[in-house]
Image: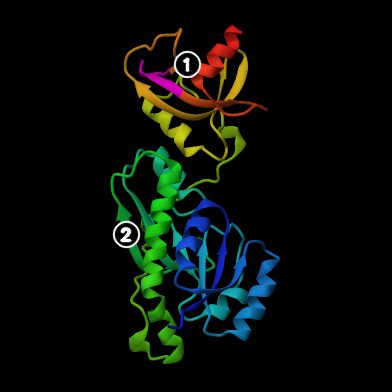
Amino acid sequence: MKMPKIIFFGNGPLADTTLKVLEQSTELLFHARTKEDLETVKSLKREHPDALGILASFGVLIKEDVLSLFEPEGILNLHPSLLPKYRGASPIESAILAGDSDFSVSIMKLVKKMDAGPIYHQETCESLPLDKSAIYEALATAGASWLVKNLPTFESFHTSPDQNLFPEYREQVDDAATFTQKLDKSMSFLSPETDSAEKTLRKIVAFQGFPKPKYNFFAQDVIILSAHIENSCPDAKKSLFIKCADNNFVVIDKLQPLSRKPMDARSFLNGLKG
């Protein structure tokens, strides 16, 4: 059975999982990772006009000279939010910080205006665990699975360009759009003196990987890798914890002192005693 040809654009965990699913049912012509790769994309698309473009977390501006090659359906952008909500660079992290428990993915046409293209598909994954890696994987898998099922429809339009065969889509309502900000290192250090335990924990989850959630324990800056909330004060001799503004406690399960290997909180405390 002939598989759809794709040119893939993407970097990072969302892209990795998306491509893992796509590779099972498509013929990957090229994986673009950098701005320089776009020249190869242009050459390959001209050589294979039926190739479909798929993007997930590319992080590079794609200009009109590339976008126009993939008309009319465009480059299919897997964006992890319920657009037009959470447009921009950090949709999953912003949803975590906002207190969301349901997370969504949209398949849209990439256009010059950021995350503003028409939408081919949306779905929501409900009650996901508060785990950034798990959320990334669930949304990438859901979006990529829809693409695998529907790429033949996009491909058939190239073979018989009848407008009646063009996949259904709907335009976004720009007035309903919300926007996310790019994460940076200035956000790393936690602020439990003004944040609740829930907000502090969500920062710990959202900032995994980058910008890395940090706190100072016993005059040592550490990266917090995992934690949980307790309502009563833990035993200070056995637990490493942060008291928050709402008088609840974020208890550290795993951490990484700067320039050292990850360890559990008990090992960190035992090292202080030694």
- Earlier sequence position, callout 1 versus callout 2: 2
Residue 3 picture location, percent across and down? 46, 79
Residue drawn where x is 63% and y is 61% of the image? 33
- Above or below, 48 against 174 in this view is below
The percent position of residue 173, horizontal first and vertical second, equals 36, 63
Whether residue 183 is in magenta: the answer is no
**Residue 247 lies in magenta, yes or no?**
yes
Looking at the rendered structure, the kind of residue marked 2 is Glu
Q: Which residues are magenta?
A: 243-252
Where in the figure is residue 2, as x and y percent of width and height? Answer: 46, 83
Residue 42 found in image quarter: bottom right
- The residue at the point 28 percent across, 49 percent down is 126
Residue under the image location 49 percent in, 75 percent down: 74
Find disc 1 in the rendering and name its residue: 240
**Dot label at residue 172:** none
Q: Please tell me in which quadrant of the rendered image residue 108 appears.
A: bottom left
Which image quarter holds the C terminus? top right
Q: Which residue is mark 2?
A: 123
**What's under tag 1, amino acid-wise?**
Leu
In the image: residue 72, left or right of residue 176: right
Nearer to us in this view, 107 or 264:
264
User: 10 Å neighbourhood of mark 2: few (<14), some, or many (≥20)?
Assistant: some
Q: Is residue 83 visible?
A: no
Q: Is residue 273 above or below residue 222?
A: above
Secondary structure found at label 1: loop
Residue 84, quarter of picture: bottom left
**Does 125 sit left or right of 208 as displayed?**
left
Assign a secondary structure to mark 2: strand
Spatial separation of the CA atoms under disc 1 and disc 2: 39 Å
Q: Nearer the viewer, mark 1 or mark 2?
A: 1
Residue 190 in the image: above or below residue 3: above
* Foreground pick, 145 / 85: 145
